[in-house]
Each structure stands twice: as structure tokens, then as C-alpha cells.
Amino acid sequence: MSYFLLIILLPLTSSVEGQKEFPDNFKFGVSSSAYQIEGAWSEDGKGESIWDHLVHNHPEKIRDRSNGDVACDSYHLWHRDVEMLKELGVDTYRFSIAWTRIMPTGIGNQVNPKGVEYYNSLINALLANNITPYVVLYHWDLPQRLQEMGGWINRDTIGRFKEYARFAFETFGDRVKWWTTFNEPVQICRESYEQDAMAPGYDFPGIPCYLCAHNLLLAHAETVQLYRLHYQSSQGGKIGISLSSAWAQPRSDSADDREASEMNLQFIIGWFAHPIFSTNGNYPQIMIDRIGNFSAQQGFAKSRLPTFSADEIRQIKESSDFLGFNTYTSYMVHKLDEQNANIFPQPSFNHDSGVVEYPNTSWPETASSWFRVHPKGIYNLLTWIRREYDNPDVFVTENGYSDHGDMRDTNRVEYFKKYMDAVLDAVGEGCNVKGYFAWSLMDNFEWRGGIVERFGLYYVDFNHPNRTRTRKSSAKFYADVIKKRKIDMELMPEPDDYTPYSAAEAVSTRVKPVIIAAMIVYLYKLIY
Ligand code: GBH
């Protein structure tokens, strides 16, 4: 009997320490996003996005006053990007389309053929190399024109987005079989309307973030419905959404602290996941109750959390073929109580959620202020999702580490070892994790963090006109994981050689042609 059990269980768990393997059909990829890598911000007819607008009008809001005007210049250097993907051996590449590159104003009456050509070339090159494109329609770069009409606060934006999505399905859907509507909708609303941490950065707590989220949920559901009705059966693809959260670690084992963790996850993950992935749909009851009660106390005629009609609830429910999930870090949490009630403005999302997040100083720091290393967090999150939403298909669509640009990036390698191992623990216990994407293919424009905070597997020399990309230790490490389908805990590869592009070299390349031209003119004058 016990032998019999062993034979059955062994291949399922393969849990012998250090021997854990990724399942055969598990997909490995890397992620990037358009604004963070493409550059060419106004080239070939591209229109202005809210990020172009922010970096040009408020350079002081970027940590190092850098911007994405050129970024990694992937608009011109995508051949090299594909080469790197081949070096890594990834199954799939997650990138986003810049709405303003294919529809310059965001409004569907005008499309930009050059932009379409760019994505066609990239997609075709990926397919030619057996790399599956995994395309995100919206990674934060709303057309500025639409922002001027209210952005995600305006219900009209839903229709605009659908028109854009329809064009993308129509144009690329014969070859793209994996679609994501939105990357990190909570961050879109909370860090851009509620707080001034992204673009447009309104710093307007308690009201617009809920309107934004409401419209995003509707835009997502309507787009998925459109895809399912008109494209899915003929094109045979899948469509989903990428949510994102830190793990909320209770301050202690007390019931209150554990409840704080649950409240936090309901507000951050449940806000979008409950309407889409739960059996009953709609917002989590705890959000409806808390925001409703506070709104009444604060003198609002109705809840600041908008309500869905029964039809909308039905439409949003099950509007995803998979759950994309991004995670980087964990926070400690406890409840907001009488003594600390004033630390948040009223009304505000944080006050509504009733939870205080704070860093655990015993967890290792990274180059980003919001980010400390706690590998157990990803395991806890995947387990929470499995339990909460009946074990949906999950792709870890982003996970990675920030430093200041080490080539021998041992901390990043250690991070990947521990986080991927924690993913394997979750898989071993039955979580339906189907794939993992490392953030990011290469160093890129880290939003408000500029180019100071680097997440890349490849180092990018932002001083070099060719934006040279060089393999860090982590790139070789990840390639090894993909090849062997398991994590070599001992491995610490040496990075490729890299010589920084020197200022002198930069001057000489710029000055040389001038000298040569002057000599030609001089000789010309001498002769004639
Ligand atoms: C993801 O966001 C994004 O999808 C990706 O584009 C990004 O490059 C990557 O992760 C790394 O950040 O402390 O006020 O500066 C993760 C969510 C967005 C959370 C930025 C922290 C900064 C808040 N992060 N945010 S602040």
C-alpha cells in the first residue's frame, strides 16, 4: 500500500529538497513595457502619452530627472532584443503596445501605419524564433488627449479603449494568442489618481481612484466580451488581466493583525479579482461595507464606491481566461486604530481599507524604497489566490529585483533562486501556476525611479548611443533555469565583459566628423 502511494505521489510532488522541477508545460518568459523600453517617443507619427507629458512637464518628479524619450531605444534596437530573448531561451516574451504609437491621439479615427509596422516586425521576429508573444494592451501609457478628457474617470474612455483593442485583435490577433487588457489596474488608479506616484499623479484621495477602477473593470470586461464574441473562436487565443500586490504580513499572530492582512489583500487584490474571479462577482463585501459606511459618516449622499448593475456584475464575472499576477515584495500590516487614525487623510483609500503598511527592517533592502526581499511572500500570495478564487490558472507575469546596476548581480540571482523556489513550493501544493516572467529583460526606465533603479537581466548603458546591452550574472542564471527546468542553488555565473562608454569616447565620436568636415572645407578652399 505505502509503495503504491509513493509511486503515485512522487511524480506529482517531486519535493525532494533541491530536486524540485518545473512541470513540463510550465512557460518561462521575461517582461517589459512599451514606455519603459521603446524610446522614439515622437518618432514616425507616435502621439503623446501621459508619461511623455509628465516627464516633459515635471522632470523634477523623476528621481534622476531622466525620461523615456530614448530609453533602451527598442523602437530601433528590437533586433537585439530578440537576440537576447534567444540567448535566454525563453518560451515567451511579455511586452506592451503603446496605444499612442498605433493611434496617436487614442481616438480611433486615425491610425499610424508606422507604429503598426513596428509591432508587426517584432511579433513576426518572435514567432520566427519560436518565442510566443504575450501582449499587454495597456501598461500605463494613456494617450494624453484622453487624459485631457478625464482619462479613466471618464466613462467615454471605456469605448476608446475598446476601439483600440479591437484594432489590435484585428491587426495582430492572427499571430498573437495571449492578450492582457490591463497591467496592474490597482496601481493605475491608486498611484495615479489617489496618489502622486505615477502619471498623471493627481494626489486626490478617496474619490477618483474608485471611479477609475470601476471604469477599468468595465473596459476590461467589455473588451474581453468583444474578443470572445468576434475573435476568440477564429483566432484561438486567450485573454486575461495582470493584477499586482505585495504580501501583507500580519504584525503578530493576533486575530486583529491577521484580519488586517486579510483586509489589505481584499482591498488590493480583491478590488479587481473578486469581480472577475469569485463565484458571486462584484466588489468584495468588505469594500462595499467599509466604503459605504465611511461615506455616509463623511456626509456623502452615496457611497464613494460606485455600484454595478446586475448585468454588469454578470458581464465582469469570469471575464478572464487566466490571472496574471505581479509581485515583488511584502509589507508588515496592522489595523488602523484610534491612536493612529489620523495618519491618513479622510476620505482616502488607505483610511477606507483600515490597514497600516510598514516595512520590515529585517528584510533586505533593494534600490527601490518600497521594496524589500521576502520570498515567502510570493508563496503566501499564490496560496491565498488559490484558496480565494478556486485555483485559477495563474501566470506570474512580473517578478524581479532592483539594484543600482551591478554586472555581477549576486543579490538578483539570490532573489530569483528564492522567489522561484517559493513558486515551486506553491506549484508542489497544487497551485495552478502555468508560467513565470522575470521583470525585466533589461534595465529600463523605472517610472518615477528613473534609470537609477535597475531591474534588468541585461545591463543597459544609457550613455552609449547604441544603448549597448550586456549579460549580467542573472541573465546566465535564468537561462540555466530555463534550460534545466530547475533551480541550481549553487550556480553564480560570471557576467559578460563590459566597458562603460566613456565620456571621452562620446566626445571624440561627436567631434571627429566635425574635424573631418573642416579639413575637407579647408582643402577645398586651398585647391580652388
Ligand atoms: C511593476 O509595478 C510595473 O508593472 C513595472 O512597470 C515596474 O517597472 C515594476 O513593477 C517595478 O516597479 O514608492 O511611491 O515610488 C510594481 C508596482 C509600482 C509599486 C511603482 C511601487 C512606486 C511607488 N510598483 N510603485 S513609490
Image (cartoon, grey):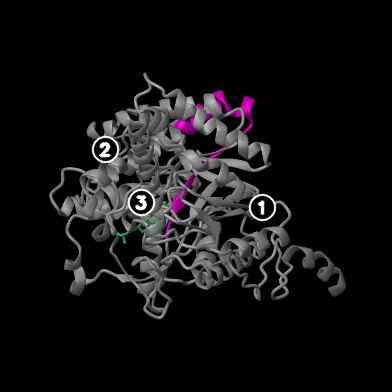
Which residue is pictured at 47% across the width and 72% down the height? 374
**Helix, strand or loop status at disc 1:** loop
- Compared with residue 395, is residue 239 higher up or lower down, i.e. above or below? above
Q: Callout 3 environment at 10 Å: few (<14), some (14 to 19), or many (20+)?
A: many
**Of the two numbered discs 3 and 1 in the rendering, the one whose residue sits closer to the viewer:** 1
Give the mark nearest the N terminus, 3 or 1.
1
Rendered-image quadrant of the N terminus: bottom right
Whether residues under marks 3 and 1 lie with C-beta atoms below 8 angstroms apart, the answer is no
The residue wearing badge 2 is 153
Give the mark nearest the N terminus, 2 or 3.
2
Q: Callout 1 environment at 10 Å: few (<14), some (14 to 19), or many (20+)?
A: many
Whether residues under marks 2 and 1 lie with C-beta atoms below 8 angstroms apart, the answer is no
Quadrant hosting ligand 1: bottom left
Which residue is pictured at 41% across the width and 56% down the height? 505
The residue wearing badge 3 is 187
Disc 3 marks a residue whose amino acid type is Gln
Nearer to me, 209 or 161? 161
The residue wearing badge 1 is 89
Q: Callout 2 environment at 10 Å: few (<14), some (14 to 19), or many (20+)?
A: many
Which residue is pictured at 44% across the width and 44% down the height? 73
Magenta residues (range): 223-245
Disc 1 marks a residue whose amino acid type is Gly
- Compared with residue 1, is residue 398 higher up or lower down, i.e. above or below? above
Disc 2 marks a residue whose amino acid type is Ile
Q: Tell me where residue 250 appears, x and y as whole percent.
A: 40, 73
Distance (Cα) linking label 2 and label 1: 41 Å
Whether residues under marks 2 and 3 lie with C-beta atoms below 8 angstroms apart, the answer is no
Distance (Cα) linking label 2 and label 3: 15 Å
Does the beta carbon of the residue at mark 3 sit less than 8 Å from ligand 1?
A: yes
Distance (Cα) linking label 3 and label 1: 31 Å
**Of the two numbered discs 2 and 1 in the rendering, the one whose residue sits closer to the viewer:** 1
